[in-house]
Amino acid sequence: MKTFLIDPDKCTGCRDCEMVCSLYHEKVLNPARSRITVIRDPLNGIELPAVCMQCEDPVCVLVCPVNAIYVDENGAKVIDYSKCMGCRTCVITCPLGGALIDPVTGKTIKCDLCGGDPMCVKFCSTHAIEWVDVSVANQRIKRATLERYLEALRKGKG
Amino acid sequence: MLKRKVAFVDLSKEKVVVEEIPKELRKKHLGGRGLNWYYIYNNVTPEVEPFDPENLLVIGTGFLTGLPCLGTGRTQISTKGPLTKGVGDANMGGAFGPELRYAGFDHLVIKGKAKEPVYLFVYNGEIEIRKASHLWGLDTYETQKALKEEIGDERVESMVIGKAGENKVYFANVMNNIKNAGGRGGTGAVMGSKNLKAIATRGTMDMHIHDVDKFIEYAMQMNQQVLSTKWAKTLSRLGTPLLYDVSYTTGFIGTMNWQYNTPGKEGEPLEAEYLQDYIVKHTACMGCSVHCRHRVKIERGEYAGLITEGPEYTMMGSFGTLVGCYDWDLVIKGNDECNRWGVDNLSLGAIISWAFELYQREILTEKDVGFKLEWGDKNAVLELARMIVEREEIGDLLANGFLEAAKKIGEDSLYYAIHVKGQPDLHTDERGIPSFALGIATSTRGADHLRSRPAIDLFQLPEEFLEKLIGYKIKSDFTAYETKGILVWWFELYFNIVDSLGVCKFQSTFNCPHCPQYDEYVPLLKYATGLDFTKEELIQIGERNYTMERLFNIINGLGKEHDYPPERFFKEPNKRGLPFMKGRKLDRDKYEKMLMEYYAQHGWDENGVPKEETLKKLGIEKPKPNFPEVE
Amino acid sequence: MSEKYEARCLNCRKRFEVEKGAEIAVCNHCGSKWRISWVTPEQPKVQGPA
Ligand code: SF4
Ligand SMILES: [Zn+2]
């Protein structure tokens, strides 16, 4: 099983992810139509990539009044456009901002993992976003947490 | 990428005319810098002064700006500049250019002068002229924050001026975000002269790619090619300060205003590695996988708590070696101030260090300045900088650059002013490196390192390799003069193409011979735009664009006599540095021959004027005004 | 991974070998002695004169 691993400290704000996402899905360059968004405010020092985390128990699937969101073989929560009526219920309820509205077509859009090999990950030169096995993710998260803990201890002593 | 739009904005008449950019113009000039100069060459006649309403301010995105590769986040800003009264031209990174393209425009050609401060709001195919009196006086950060707030969209990207632009300081920048600067050409001053405080843009329009699948694959390949180089790895970690280690160790860094060519041991605290202590995060321009920028924080000392971006190598001279200060705190603090003011830190530094040397030589006195200008005095540096930007007392004089200031201070003082065509030089000391010296001398925007500098000349690459890259036999020895006219010619055309495409120079064959160049641009252009260019055609476009800039300079009085490096580089040998650098200076006869070789290579006559046959071959005609007349 | 690390000498401008993790190195072509910093654990560079 795989998961996104996002490290905002590594995000440079280049937005290659947004550009390639729109290109891959909509065949045009337009970051406003990307499924991944970098919340970015360089004047205040913020770069924060946000994308659907493909929840285990996804609220979007639960709330969709027409059951338009299904789970594919990669675990991606995918919109079936033959059913989706664009009611925005998932957009409003997703706590992570994973579902969005395409400003050109008005359709609801969300990450579909590009069929199992996400393009944003391929284009992220600093590995701020990765698509890794959950065991690897767990290990890395634990390690980062421990390092912070040790750092705090050291500071406390020094 | 075709069928893109240019907007002609007349601020006096408050009118906007939008046209489609014809394919023939793309074939002849590409975009960005090339197309900018097509508009200026045709519409700005010699009697127009830089601050006249008739002068144009042209904003141009590169033909490839806004792609997820090669740092194509770049924008070119061009005008008749106040410092040189010729080509005033700046290339800015960041995210403004891509956003402008997503808002539907590639070029904005602006003329006239607004009655009161205004800003342009460019949004999805529309351009609005809006009042900006409430923004006048705000610094560049505050202005951008206010614009985001007022427009109500945090994705608004703006190109703004600060105090320096408002006060028409001759070397004022336009700025985007914290540190992306359109510097060197005085474009900010021209913007200020038009009462134009900002251009804010936001777009959610599609940009079309000719062959999406091939493009995605190739873009990824391009990024990998860049990232695999040692250069990119070093730049990713250290940013441009990495250049300091080389220049101060070798001895080609102006010190105490070019009296010395390195501070030697004293300069050790400024080594790039020591900047690591300040770095909070790496940041990048849009579409860049290299991320040469730093977000830094000063933890201790008198500037404690300051969080900002940068500094670049330029600042290490300006508020560093040039004024005899070797303290990262000052470099970072000064850099932040410059960015808020929107001033070219490089020109500002050269002018400050000039004043310091004039003080040392008693040409300027404490009475003239109001305080002492002693080498290494941080506060004196910061205070003089502020006075220049605010145009206070002697600052008012210095704000007009070397040439005008020297009229009052005395023409002899110009010997100590390191400039070409009135444009202050980067703090590099070129007197030991003939190709660098020729490059700053012939650069169309005056002394500058980003118009042709063959940085790879220093690597002494094998001659077979150079022949393959340049297409001519080039001497590997960087102290040689022969063949270096051709080397500089090659880089002039090449950098023009880089600027016309909107590619970042740090991801080109600038400091690294293995980065993508013409051979890679051909397929990239094909996949992105659908247009077929050959390498030879691209080189010819470079020649055409470059020659138009040259012609513009010539009709504005900048000919051969302005194609020389500073006199000091011929007279005073280097006093310090590694053995092969110490004692070197420029040789007048050899320089002259190199200049002739360079002219000939361009197809220009012995006075540096493009020959008739050259113009014919390039299809350059006499200027024909084509700014649409509006009622 | 080969165990060979190289930096460019600022004096003779040739690449010379640097021992892993070294802080000081001498160019085997011209004998210049340099302080070394590491861009990555695999990539040394000359930081300044030793
Ligand atoms: S290398 Fe630096 S200047 Fe160039 S695009 Fe990247 S961040 Fe911008
Ligand atoms: Zn050596």
Image (cartoon, coloured by chain):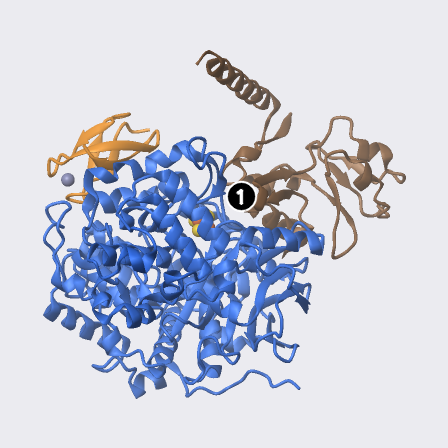
Chain colours: A brown, B blue, C orange
Q: Which residue is mark 1?
A: A123
Q: Position of residue B37 (x, y in %)?
A: 45, 74
Up-down: is B550 above or below B221? below
Amino acid type of the residue that numbered disc 1 sits on in the rendered structure: Phe
Q: Position of residue B16 (x, y in %)?
A: 65, 76
Total numbered badges shown on the rendered structure: 1
Secondary structure of residue under mark 1: helix
Q: Quadrant of the N terminus of chain A?
A: top right
Which quadrant of the figure has residue B404?
Answer: bottom left
Which quadrant of the figure has residue B249?
Answer: top left
Q: Quadrant of the C terminus of chain A?
A: top left
Which quadrant of the figure has residue B541?
Answer: bottom left
Q: Chain of mark 1?
A: A
Query: Is residue B421 something one can see in this rendering?
Result: no
Q: State the residue at coordinates (35%, 51%).
A: B314
Q: Position of residue B156 (x, y in %)?
A: 64, 54
Relative placement, left or right, of B619 versus B191 is: left
* Label 1 Cα neighbours within 10 Å, binned few <14 / some 14-19 / many ≥20: many
Q: State the residue at coordinates (53%, 43%).
A: A123
Up-down: is A13 above or below A56? below
Q: Position of residue B125 (x, y in %)?
A: 68, 67
Relative placement, left or right, of A7 versus B223 is: right
Q: State the residue at coordinates (44%, 52%).
A: B338
- The single residue placed furthest to the right in the displayed view is A65
Query: Is residue C49 something one can see in this rendering?
Result: yes
Q: Please state which of residues C32 and B80 is positioned toward the viewer in this rendering.
A: B80
- The single residue placed furthest to the top in the displayed view is A157
Q: Please state which of residues A72 and C41 is positioned toward the viewer in this rendering.
A: C41
Q: State the residue at coordinates (26%, 68%).
A: B441
